[in-house]
DNA sequence: TCGTTGCGAAACTTGGTCGTATCGAAATTA
DNA sequence: TAATTTCGATACGACCAAGTTTCGCAACGA
């Protein structure tokens, strides 16, 4: 028990540079954001991009995958606040958050990795899904379920399928939709189109 | 002008083996189907898988991308026949074709490439889109437009957005939906859900 | 039969990355 | 000041894949 034992017993010597750590994480995300797959990321490229020695990376992470896991984990998921006034409004809020994120190269390329390398890096994906995907999924689910409960949405809906409807549409638009940024009113149009349905007449029995 | 000038003036020497060519293409598609990205494909792996010397590959394609372009180009797009009786039926046919294709590892992994490597291999993607994506896109578009024309679908629909709705939902399901094969009635459920809409009441003005 | 071309296999050169080690300088504690 | 630890830089040996070349054999036309 030394005199300065306030939780973190700082060892002697030069402390690790937080700036270097941040630079490494940023460089990793940048490279991913430029379209690199996990398997093409090289420690050397990351070190060079970050302006850092390889030693500094290996001192912190024992291998590439651990580094990528940490890098992806720093992508926070600040869900938009939901007004809760109507299911329609909340759906638009959620989808508009997706639209805005789809405009960022980083998010887009992380999504690329999630789509294409999930099978090869299950550990990585597991952590990433837990951190970034699950919160959104659950937010969307709770909104949909609330809508069913309040009658704003039809009873008997397949909630998972509804979620696929919204998420899939937004993702498809961001990847294959019109070039450039997604239109600002996309979320609203998607939600209204889905809520209202496409049918021209409601001649159901 | 020799005596045998029938269009293809066969040069002297042993002719190129069509079998080898086919084996190379197949091996390429197999490896892609096993989850390899374009950048991870190695000519050596392809040659080894195809039971072929590297020379035989380099004699035909000057680089990896040309080979992959040719390989993907051989993936045919046999669209399902459309009954044309109702827009609903045709939509189900198209979406069910997607569902069935999503069950094939090859198609799935080609889709992975399309999603994640489109930016890095624009030439490749251009040809692939033209060959495999466009026909489907146009088939879907014509069905939707016919629906609007006949009144089966609401007037004033954003046709591109409708297409994103269907394509995106199916793709999302195949990637993030329940594990294993997609349920056989998925296409029907998606189409009906979208046509009918989610709203619980139609209190629109 | 002979010349030409393709074949698969193997050797080879080149270049990139890995993970480790070493260096002098810098930052911190004691 | 001395001890300790990290810093960025660089060098190292090992490995792997790319792309080229060489080899002996096979398949074709003349």
Image: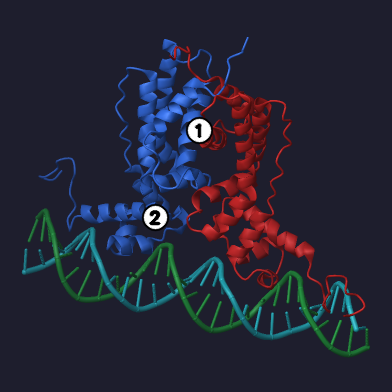
Chain colours: A red, B blue, C cyan, D green
Query: Which quadrant of the rendered structure holds the N terminus of chain B?
Result: top left
In this rendered view, identify the residue nearer to me: B99 or A115: B99
Give residue A72's position: percent from left, percent from top.
Answer: 64, 54
What number is the disc on residue A110? none
In the picture, measured across the screen, residue A93 lies left or right of residue B118, that is right
User: Which quadrant of the structure image shows residue B23?
Assistant: bottom left
Residue B120, percent from left and from top: 52, 48
Q: Please state if A128 lies on the left or on the right of B91 as rendered.
A: right
What residue occupies the far top of the structure in this picture?
Answer: B205
Is residue D25 shown left or right of residue A47?
A: left
Q: Does residue B96 appear in this view? A: yes
Return the x and y of residue B91 as percentages of the image width and height.
39, 25
Q: Secondary structure at mark 1?
A: loop
Chain bearing mark 2: B
Q: Quadrant of the C terminus of chain B?
A: top right
Looking at the picture, does residue C16 appear above or below residue A180? Answer: below
Chain under disc 1? A
Residue in view at x 74 percent, y 60 percent: A22
> Which residue is labeled 1 in the image?
A158
Q: Is residue B135 visible?
A: no
Across and down, in percent, residue B54 comes to: 33, 63
Which mark is nearer the camera, 1 or 2?
Answer: 1
Name the side, left or right, on which B77 lies relative to A93: left
Q: Residue at x 13, y 45 (%)?
A: B2
- Residue at numbered disc 2: B34
What's the CA distance linking mark 1 and mark 2?
32 Å
Q: Residue at x 18, y 46 (%)?
A: B9
- Count how many numbered circles sit on residues in the image: 2
Label 2 SS:
loop
Residue B147, placed above or below residue B132: above
């Amino acid at each position: 028990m030394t005199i300065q034992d306030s939780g973190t017993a700082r060892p002697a010597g030069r402390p690790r540079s937080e700036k270097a750590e941040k630079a490494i994480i940023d460089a990793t995300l940048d490279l991913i954001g430029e379209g690199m797959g996990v398997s093409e990321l090289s420690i050397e490229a990351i070190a060079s991009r970050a302006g850092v020695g390889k030693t500094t990376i290996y001192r912190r992470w024992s291998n590439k995958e651990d580094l990528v896991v940490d890098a992806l984990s720093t992508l926070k998921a600040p869900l938009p606040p939901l007004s809760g006034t109507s299911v329609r409004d909340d759906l638009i809020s959620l989808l508009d958050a997706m639209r805005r994120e789809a405009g960022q190269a980083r998010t887009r390329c992380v999504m690329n990795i999630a789509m294409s390398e999930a099978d090869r890096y299950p550990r990585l994906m597991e952590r990433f899904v837990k951190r970034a995907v699950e919160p959104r999924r659950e937010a969307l689910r709770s909104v949909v379920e609330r809508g069913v409960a309040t009658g704003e949405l039809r009873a008997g809906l397949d909630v998972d399928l509804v979620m696929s409807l919204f998420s899939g549409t937004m993702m498809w638009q961001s990847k294959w939709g019109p070039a450039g940024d997604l239109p600002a009113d996309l979320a609203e149009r998607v939600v209204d189109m889905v809520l209202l349905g496409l049918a021209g007449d409601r001649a159901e029995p």
